[in-house]
Image (cartoon, rainbow, N blue to C red):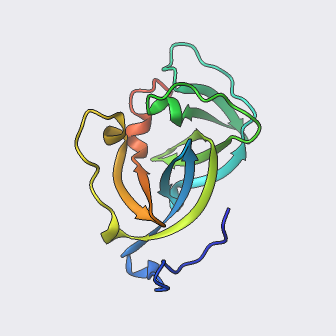
Amino acid sequence: MEAFDSRDESGQEHDLESGNSMQLIAFMIGEQVYGVEITTVREIRAWSGATPLPNTHDYVRGVINLRGTIVPIFDLRARFGDGLTDTTKNHVVVVMSVGEKWVGMLVDAVSDILTISKKDVHKVPEGDSMDSELLNGIVTHDSKMVGLIDLDAIVVGAKIEK
């Protein structure tokens, strides 16, 4: 992971306090980069398996016990319709808060911490793609497109106890 730098490509410092910028944790699924607001991230852990649950969607890998809290684990690759992740010891789970609940997202790797300007976030193009339903924006960073995950949309309908 690259070291955090609050400056963008032009060397300008972002003003987080003004509310015009936000910080993201960026992670990889294959070659695609996705991100979530850093304030939602509670922990990043190495993949060590999950206890499967009956009658859940295939993208719900199961649950883990995180210091007494039961956390459902979503396979983000499967959630985007690309099949289950063939997990290795290099995969990670990003534990995030979604409202009052904690959920984990299985991803290939955490890649960076990004500071972006809110004015640079674009709407997701309309289409039949599952991506457009599960993202709430797209931003370009270092010539790569970063999909901004809509956490509420990811977990809706997953049949996980509230």
Q: How many marks?
A: 0
Judging depth in this view, the residue of 30 and 6 nearest the camera is 30
Of all residues shown, which one is farthest toward the front?
Answer: 143
Q: Is residue 77 left or right of residue 117?
A: right
Q: Residue at horizontal 60%, vertical 18%?
A: 53
Q: Position of residue 73 (x, y in %)?
A: 59, 33
Q: Residue at horizontal 44%, vertical 33%?
A: 80
Q: Is residue 91 above or below residue 8?
A: above
Q: Is residue 86 above or below residue 110?
A: above
Q: Is residue 122 left or right of residue 66?
A: left
Q: Position of residue 84 (x, y in %)?
A: 57, 25
Q: Is residue 52 left or right of residue 151?
A: right
Q: Is residue 151 above or below residue 38?
A: above
Q: Residue at horizontal 51%, vertical 13%?
A: 55
Q: Is residue 113 left or right of residue 137?
A: right
Of all residues shown, which one is farthest toward the bottom?
Answer: 12
Snapshot quadrant of residue 26:
bottom right
Of all residues shown, which one is farthest toward the left?
Answer: 126
Q: Residue at horizontal 64%, vertical 20%?
A: 52
Q: Position of residue 33 (x, y in %)?
A: 50, 51
Judging depth in this view, the residue of 9 and 13 nearest the camera is 9
Q: Position of residue 50 (x, y in %)?
A: 69, 28
Location of the N terminus (image quadrant): bottom right
